[in-house]
Amino acid sequence: MRSTWMISAAVSAVFTLSACGEKPQDKMGIRSDQPAQAGTGVAAFTEPGWKAGDHASWSNHLRARANYGMNDHQRAPK
Amino acid sequence: MARMKFICDAERCIECNGCVTACKNEHEVPWGVNRRRVVTLNDGVPGEKSISVACMPCSDAPCMAVCPVNCFYKTDEGVVLHDKDVCIGCGYCSYACPFGAPQFPGQGTFGVRGKMDKCTFCAGGPEEHGSQAEFDKYGRNRLAEGKLPACAEMCSTKALLAGDGDVVSDIFRSRVVQRGKGAEVWGWGTAYGTAAKQGA
């Protein structure tokens, strides 16, 4: 009796909590693309300071670029 | 994992349309197509607000949901892109998008409507990165060049912010704290029921 109650509680919890989850965000659709961090291979247009193929390097580079270019409160003298 | 987002700071936007010009120039967007537009509410009235609008890479994108040929895909960074070789130019995405992002050039294969064109967050398309084919169809792939979207990087007042959602929200939060007026994000009051403070 007790196990039946626990199973039904677990099943209902699964159904209830499934709405709290998030849909997968990565790689949807029929065609996937090369990752952005793979680079273009065109040196003339590529910003220096990061390594093609290294996601962490690319991500950190964009983070620094965003802060330098857009965060004027960080750049202004205190 | 980064999730690319735009935020337009309506307190800073001066409706100069520099973002629109930067976008058109960077991607050589054809006549009649505006991947980005500046919208002004209460134009000419004191306190008017402007906001720059394009594809806002939705987490649960309605364009992707309604596309009958499933031409959309999402990158690891959450950028919604599409494949023009698959698009049939039906316009369903245009009806579904709350921002009016999908654009349809007058000339093209499908009569007056043409294949859909939209803001790519400067991330190109499914063609080889940096290739001429990618540029011709989707424009420049700045993300793969280690740069952020041209519209935001060219914004003279830094009203338009683009990048990883965490970074962008940190920058915006620091501005809100500095101003001391509370959050002035458009739609905040509508969503959360908090009236704007005096002078905001």
Image (spheres, coloured by chain):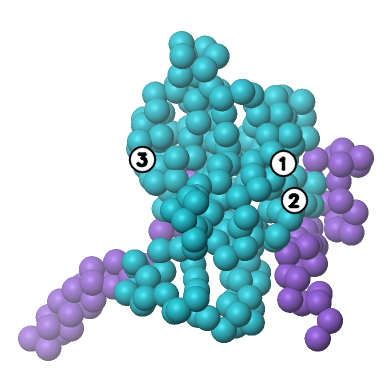
Q: Which chain is cyan?
A: B
Identify the disc placed on residue B96.
Answer: 3
Residue B141's place in the image compared with B32, above or below, is below
Residue at (29% x, 73% y) in the render? A17
**Mark before the other along the chain sequence, 2 or 1:** 1
Residue A23: x percent and y percent? 41, 58
Q: Who is closer to the viewer here, B87 or B120?
A: B120
Q: Secondary structure at mark 2?
A: helix
Chain letter of mark 1 equals B
- Quadrant for the C terminus of chain A in the image: bottom right
Amino acid type for the residue under numbered disc 1: Ala
Task: Compute the Cα span from label 2 to label 1.
Answer: 7 Å
Q: Secondary structure at mark 3?
A: helix
Determine the image quadrant of residue B197.
bottom left
**Residue where numbered disc 2 is placed:** B154
Residue B198 is drawn in which quadrant? bottom left
**Residue B115, image x, y percentages:** 51, 22
Task: Count residues near mark 1 (Cα–Cα under 10 Å), then give few for <14, some for 14-19, many for 20+.
Answer: some
Tell me the kind of residue under disc 3. Answer: Ala
Q: Is residue B174 visible?
A: yes
Question: Looking at the image, do the residues carrying marks 2 and 1 touch, with CB atoms under 8 Å apart?
Answer: yes
Q: Amino acid at mark 2?
A: Met
Hue of chain A? purple
Q: Earlier in the sequence, mark 3 or mark 1?
A: 1
Q: Dot 3: few (<14), some (14–19), or many (≥20) neighbours within 10 Å?
A: some
| Mark number displayed over residue B82 | none
User: Are callouts 3 and 1 both on one chain?
Assistant: yes
The answer to whether residue B124 is above or below residue B158 is: above
Q: CA distance from mark 3 to mark 1?
A: 26 Å
Mark 2 in CB contact with mark 3 (< 8 angstroms)? no
Location of residue B57 in the rendering, given as x and y in whole percent from the top left corner? 52, 51
Q: Which residue is mark 1?
A: B22
